[in-house]
Image (tube, rainbow, N blue to C red):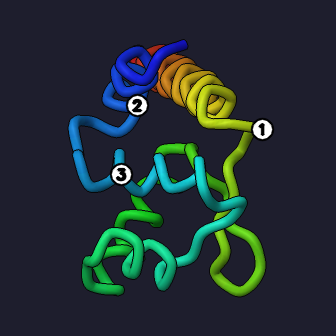
């Protein structure tokens, strides 16, 4: 998968965000990240770096470890996006199931 295809998948999961894309790409050079590494590498404020990491984790792309370190939820970028897409699909399925249950309970 080339970088353009990776970015399309990323945008599908996270939405178009150049800074979050750059944070994600840092995993090409780092096995794990924290807000300090992100802030230094991208020359952004630490609180903004922390927010970006939290947003990516909420989308299912990263997993948090002890002491604020984040690692990919796969062996590489492609894996991580595939896992996040699967998680997104399962969340959507649960929402549909919950809506069906709610609708049946009302009738």
SS state under label 1: loop
Within 10 angstroms of label 2, few (less than 14), some, or many (20 or more) residues? many
Image x and y of residue 35, in percent: 47, 79
- Say whether disc 2 or disc 3 marks the residue closer to the N-terminus: 2
Residue 24 lies, with reference to residue 45, above or below; the image says above
Of 67 and 97, nearer the camera is 67
Please tell me the numbered disc located at residue 22. Answer: 3
Residue at left 60%, top 69%?
33
Camera sees residue 58: no
Q: Residue at x 35, y 71 (%)?
A: 51
**Rendered image: mark on residue 75:** 1
Residue at x 26%, y 55% (from the top left corner): 19
Taking the spot 35% from the left edge, 39% from the top edge, the residue there is 14
Image quarter of the N terminus: top right
Up the image or down, 76 lies above or below 24; here it is above
Q: Circle 2 is placed at which residue position?
A: 10
Q: In which image quadrant can residue 6 be found?
A: top left
Q: How far across and how far down the image is residue 7, in percent?
A: 37, 27
Q: CA distance from mark 2 to mark 1?
A: 16 Å
């Amino acid at each position: 998968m080339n970088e353009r295809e990776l970015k399309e998948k990323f945008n599908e999961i996270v939405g178009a965000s150049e800074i979050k894309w750059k944070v994600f790409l840092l995993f090409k050079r780092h096995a794990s990240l924290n807000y300090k590494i992100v802030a230094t590498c991208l020359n952004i404020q630490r609180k903004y770096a922390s927010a970006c990491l939290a947003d990516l984790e909420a989308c299912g792309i990263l997993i948090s470890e002890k002491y604020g370190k984040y690692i990919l939820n796969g062996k590489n970028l492609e894996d991580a996006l595939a896992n996040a897409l699967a998680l997104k699909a399962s969340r959507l399925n649960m929402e549909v199931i919950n809506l069906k249950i709610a609708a049946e309970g009302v009738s």
